[in-house]
Amino acid sequence: MEIITHKNKSKVGEHLSSAIAADLNWLSKVLYHLDKINSGTPEEYSSIHDIELTDLSGYSSPYADFINRNNFSFQERIIIVLSLSPHLQPSLLDIFKTTKPNTLFGGVTGKNHHGFLPTGETAVFIIAGDDLVKRLQLLSFFSRKHLFYRDNILYLEDVSTAEPELSGALIASPDFVDLVLRGTVRKPDLRPDFPAKLLSTEMDWNDVVLTGITRSQLSEIESWIVHSKSLFEDPVMGKKLKPGFRALFYGPPGTGKTLSACLIGKKTGRDVYRVDLSTIVSKYIGETEKNLARLFDRASRKDWILFFDEADALFGKRTDVNDSHDRYANQEVSYLLQRIEYHEGLVILATNMKTNIDSAFLRRFQSIIYFPMPKYEERLALWKKAFSETIPPDAGIDMEQLARKYELSGSLINNIVSHATLRAFHEKAGMITPGMLQDGIARELAKEGKTL
C-alpha cells in the first residue's frame, strides 16, 4: 500500500484541501504500520497509538475548523477519517480487500462502489484489535449521545436484530461529506433515500387571506417555535410537557394549508419539508421504519418542519387485518405515530377531511386548525390580491360580482388569474379582459365537473 508523503501528497487530488490530505496521509501511515505490527515485523512503532496525530492548527478550511473546534481524540480521528476515506481516497482501504468476508476487520461491499467499505468492526479492529476492554469502550462512539450522532457527522448503518451492531457500515453523513468536499452543506431534496421535498414561497403573510381565528391559531405555532426552548427549560413546565409540537390542518383543497406551513417556516427561519408518503411506504418489511427513522433523525438535528400532506393516506382509519400485508401496514402506521409523538420539532399533518383521521391520532395534536372555504369578503380580498401590476385587470371587471357569484378557493382564484395573465402575454394585450377571466373561470370549474 502506497504511503502518501509530503512529496507526493498532491496525488490525493487537487480538489482536496491540504488539511484533509494531511489526515488521509496520517490514516495511511496508521494502516501501514498496523499491517507491519500485526505481521510481526514492526519498524518504527510498536503500537499505532504512538503515531502522533496530525496537527491541523495551522490549516484553514471547513474540515480543519471542525477538527480543531472539537479537539477529537486519537480514536475519534481514526473513525472520522475512516468514514471519509471511501469518498476521498478509496484505494487507501485496499489493504483490507479480500476475496472472502473477514470477521477480523469487517467491511462490506457496495452496490456500485467496488472498493472496501468500512464497518464499525473495521474501526474497532484498527483501534483496539482483539482487546475486549478497549472494544467495549469504543461502543460509546456509536451511541446516540455522542457528538458523531448528535451533530449528524457519522453513524453505523442499521443492521437486522440477528447481526452484531458493529457489522453496520460506517457512514459519513451526506451533510458532513458536503462540508468536507464542498465547504458548504447542500439542502437535501426528494430522492429514493430521502422521502421529502423542500418547500419554499416568495409570498408572505400579507399575501394570504385567512379567517381571524385561523391566523390566530397559526400565530400560536410560530410562538411555540420561537419560545419552545425557554418553555422546556422551565423547571416546572419542562417536566410536564412532551417534546415537540403536533398540528393538524384540515379543510377543503386550495384553502391555504400548504402555503401556511411554508410561511410558518419562512417567518421563523425553519426549512419546511413535505414528506412524500408514497416514497416512505416500502413493500419490503422493515424498510418503511428505516426510511422514517432517517428522516426524523435528520429533521430533529436540523430543526426542520415536517409537513405531511394528504395525511389520511397513512393516518386514516386503521386497516382491518385480513392478511400479513395489512398487519405490516398497521405496524408502519404505529411506528410513524410513535415517531411523531416523540419528535422534538414541529410536525404538521394536512387533510381535506378531519373525519378521515383516526380518532386515536387526533388526541396527540396540540393544535387542530380549520381552513374553511373563503366567504364573500375573503373572496373579494383574494381577487384584489391576485392580479399583477404588470398586467392589470380591465376596468370593466367587477370583482365584487366575481366574489359574490363564484364560491372559489384562494388557489383556484390564483389559477384563474395566472391563466388569464398568460393569455394576455401571449396575445400581447396590456391588460386582462373580462373574456380572458371568464375563460379561466370556466377551465377551473370544468375540472370539478361544473359549468359557468
Image (tube, grey):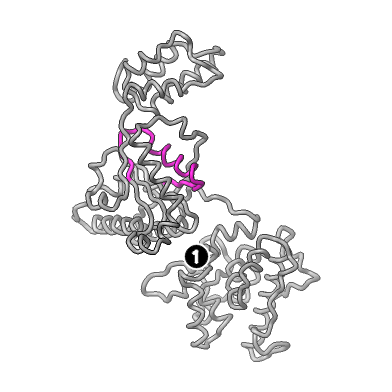
Q: Is residue 238 left or right of residue 135?
A: left
Does the magenta segment cover residue 255?
Answer: yes
In the picture, which quadrant includes the N terminus? Answer: bottom right
Where does residue 392 sit, x and y in percent of width and height? 51, 16
Q: Secondary structure at mark 1?
A: helix
Where does residue 354 sit, x and y in percent of width and height? 26, 41
Crowding near the residue tagged with mark 1, few <14, some 14–19, many ≥20 C-alpha atoms within 10 Å: some
Q: Which residue is mark 1?
A: 150
| Front residue (pair 122, 175) | 175
Which quarter of the figure has residue 118? bottom right
Does the magenta segment cover residue 235?
Answer: no
In the picture, which quadrant includes the C terminus? Answer: top left
In the rendered image, the vertical position of residue 141 relative to residue 386, given as above or below = below
Q: Residue at x 52, y 85 (%)?
A: 134
Q: Is residue 257 left or right of residue 21?
A: left
| Front residue (pair 258, 36) | 258
In the rendered image, the vertical position of residue 357 relative to residue 207, given as above or below = below
In the rendered image, the vertical position of residue 386 relative to residue 175, given as above or below = above
Stretch in magenta: 248-274
Q: Residue at x 59, y 78 (%)?
A: 75
Outermost residue, top direction?
396
Callout 1 amino acid: Arg
Where does residue 430 sit, x and y in percent of width and height? 55, 12
Where does residue 418 sit, x and y in percent of width and height? 47, 23
Query: Is residue 73 in view?
Result: yes
Q: Residue at x 69, y 82 (%)?
A: 51
In the rendered image, the vertical position of residue 278 relative to residue 353, given as above or below = below
Total labels: the figure holds 1
